[in-house]
Image (cartoon, helix red, strand yellow):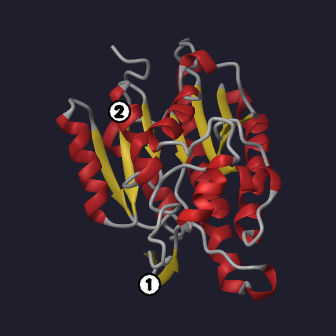
Amino acid sequence: MGTLDNKVAIVSGSGRGIGREIALKLAREGAKVVVNDLDAEPAKEVVTAIEAAGGSAVACVGSVTDEDFAQRFVDTAVDSFGGLDIIVNNAGYTWDSVVQKMTDEQWDAILDVHLKAPFRILRAAQPVISAAVKAAKDAGEPVPCRKVVNISSIAGLGGNAGQANYSAAKAGITGLTKSLAKEWGRYNVTVNTVAFGLIKTRLTQAPADGGSTIDVAGREIKVGVNPDLLTAMEQMIPLGRAGAPEEAAGAVYLLCTPESNYVSAQTVVCGGGFLM
């Protein structure tokens, strides 16, 4: 028996890194999971891993910034598993530059993936949640507590040089979270944010020459942190190290459990004690 038995979860950006670990963790605890990634292969690999462990999952491949994605994501949960109980808005990447060199394209791309996409997913989910709540009330049944966990960053709390776009988007997630917590409290939905500090993923680890890139919609985006800078950053963390993706997933899981049913509109920092 898992703490999330019979719950249905959608997790954006869950083919790799932190999102992958979130999907695996929720599935291990009994949730049926809709896995998303830009690419089919990593999404299907996570689905296969969940099924091999005895869980249930399906893939919804595509970019969260596509105009039709949000509705398709929500519909996949409803069509495959009959409902929607947990929403984790995790997908994202960074595209850094100092403000005088940052283009409109850079600004818009990061705001779209980190703020507009979660807004669209939540908007698409509202009719499903509202209808489920009404049906439960009409049947004289208790309304279960549903969960939204939006992913932010310590950059969204304190800013970060070279990341005006990312910091602004992640700060915006906090406002979105607090507003939705007030709107959706009547549906018995808790809405919270997890703000990550330094977590070891492909976006933060790179060769010393800084040559790693990811492909996003045909754009080659440089990712990674210089090893010397990474070491210096770790020394500023009270726990003395970067976090693992599994630990980041654990923070999200806490806000999906029944034990957090009276926690809403909050931001939990998962950063080893480091605060901007």
Please, which residue is most extreme toward the left here? 52
**Precedes in sequence: disc 1 or disc 2:** 2
Mark 2 Cα-neighbour bin, 10 Å: few <14, some 14–19, many ≥20:
many
Residue 65's place in the image compared with 130, above or below, is: below
Mark 1 Cα-neighbour bin, 10 Å: few <14, some 14–19, many ≥20:
few
- Of residues 133 and 169, the one nearer the viewer is 169
Residue 103's place in the image compared with 178, above or below, is: below
Q: Which residue position is annotated with label 2?
A: 27
Counting from the top left corner in percent of width and height, residue 17 is at 43, 52
Residue 164: name its quadrant: bottom right
Number of labelled discs? Answer: 2
Q: Which residue position is annotated with label 1?
A: 218
- Of residues 253 and 223, the one nearer the viewer is 223
Going 56% across and 11% down the picture, which residue do you hit? 140
For the question of whether residue 197 can be seen, the reply is: no
Residue type of the residue flagged with mark 2: Ala
Counting from the top left corner in percent of width and height, residue 148 is at 60, 38
Counting from the top left corner in percent of width and height, residue 272 is at 64, 37
Residue 190's place in the image compared with 161, above or below, is: above
Query: What element does badge 1 sit on?
Result: loop
Residue 252's place in the image compared with 88, above or below, is: above
Query: What element does badge 2 sit on?
Result: helix
Counting from the top left corner in percent of width and height, residue 145 is at 59, 23
Going 65% across and 54% down the picture, which residue do you hit? 233
Is residue 158 found left or right of 41 in the rendered image? Answer: right
Going 27% across and 35% down the picture, which residue do you hit? 56
Q: Quadrant of the N terminus?
A: top left
Q: Which mark is residue 239?
A: none
Is residue 35 found left or right of 249 in the rendered image? Answer: left
Whole-number angstrom distance, CA of label 1 to CA of label 2: 32 Å
Marks 2 and 1: in contact by CB < 8 Å? Answer: no
Residue type of the residue flagged with mark 1: Gly
